Each structure stands twice: as structure tokens, then as C-alpha cells.
Image (spheres, rainbow, N blue to C red):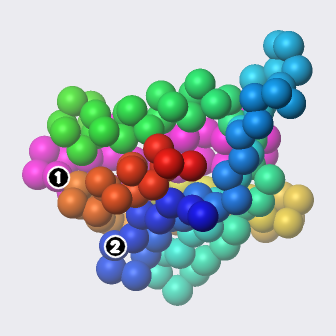
Amino acid sequence: MGARLEFCGNYIEIINFSYISENRQPGDPLYCTFDIKIRSGVFSGIADGCEYNYQEWKKFISSLEDLINFRIKKTSLFETGYGNRIDLECDRTGHIRVSGGIYGDACSHYLKFEFDTDQTAFPPFINALKSL
């Protein structure tokens, strides 16, 4: 099961999401893991083994809702394990630039990406993220 934001053949997909609260060690914020798949134009890549603080994950989902409802102009997900990054920036007409970079294969590969979408593509993505 995953969550995909797709527009005109470009996409970000969060797959293999895992959150097991009983495995969390005291003081350890890295207790949510997932993989990121990207397709931007003819380029694609996968960042596997991403780690993130689950509380920050919930804040990121909330910030996506704020973004598409014009309450904020920009939000980011900066994965703490390898430094994978997704930036989303909305203009006042609802067009959203998705950009960032992901590392693959133990940081031996790097994919810098950028594509445009609009706010209409986000509700299914946000709902899927919530259900992970």
C-alpha cells in the first residue's frame, strides 16, 4: 500500500510505510520508515530505508492540507536518515512546484527532480498518507 501524488506522468509515491510504536526506544525519534519513488520527466529513482519522526510525519500531512488551502506557501519533508528532501511550493493560483532530491543505493546515486502540479491532485494523496 502506498500514497501517490501524480500529475501529467510525474509522481511522488510513498511506499513500504512502517510505524510500529512498540519498537520505539526512549529518546529515539526515528520510528517511522518508508521508501520514496520519484518520476520526473524521463528520470526516476527510489530512495529506500527513509527514516522520519512520526510526530513530524503527522505535521507534514497537516502542512499539505494548509498548502492546498492557501494557508501557507511552502512545506518540506526532510528525511532524517539520508537527507532525502521534498519541497512543495504553491503560488496564489493553486499551481504547486514539487522539487527536491533523493539518494539511492547507499548514497551512490542522487536524483534531483522538479515538476509542476496543482492543488486538485492532492486530496487523494493526502488521504492515502493519512491511511498509512
- Work out whether residue 73 or residue 120 is closer to the camera in this orientation and state it: 120
Q: Position of residue 11 (x, y in %)?
A: 46, 70
- Work out whether residue 8 or residue 14 is closer to the camera in this orientation and state it: 14
Q: Position of residue 128 (x, y in %)?
A: 45, 55
State which quadrant residue 48 falls in: bottom right
Q: How many discs appear?
A: 2
**What residue is shown at x 23% (from left), y 55% (from top)?**
119
Confirm whether the magenta stretch covers residue 103: no
Q: Is residue 112 visible from the viewing direction of this image?
A: no
Assess disc 1: are there few (<14), some (14-19) or many (≥20) residues with their C-alpha within 10 Å of its C-alpha: some
**What residue is shown at x 49% (from left), y 74% (from top)?**
40
Confirm whether the magenta stretch covers residue 84: yes
Judge from the rendering whether residue 121 lies leftward or rightward of residue 105; answer left or right: left
The quadrant of the picture occupied by the N terminus is bottom right
As helix, strand or loop, the secondary structure at mark 1 comes to: loop
As helix, strand or loop, the secondary structure at mark 2 comes to: strand
| Residue type, label 2 | Phe
Q: Residue furthest top?
A: 27
State which quadrant residue 45 falls in: bottom right
**What residue is shown at x 59% (from left), y 25% (from top)?**
55
Picture disc at residue 94: 1
* CA separation in Å, label 1 and label 2: 14 Å
- Work out whether residue 41 or residue 119 is closer to the camera in this orientation and state it: 119
Judge from the rendering whether residue 59 lies leftward or rightward of residue 124; answer left or right: right
Assess disc 2: are there few (<14), some (14-19) or many (≥20) residues with their C-alpha within 10 Å of its C-alpha: some
Question: Which residue is the site of mark 2?
Answer: 7
| Residue type, label 1 | Gly
Q: Are the two marked residues, 1 and 2, in contact with CB atoms closer than 8 angstroms?
A: no
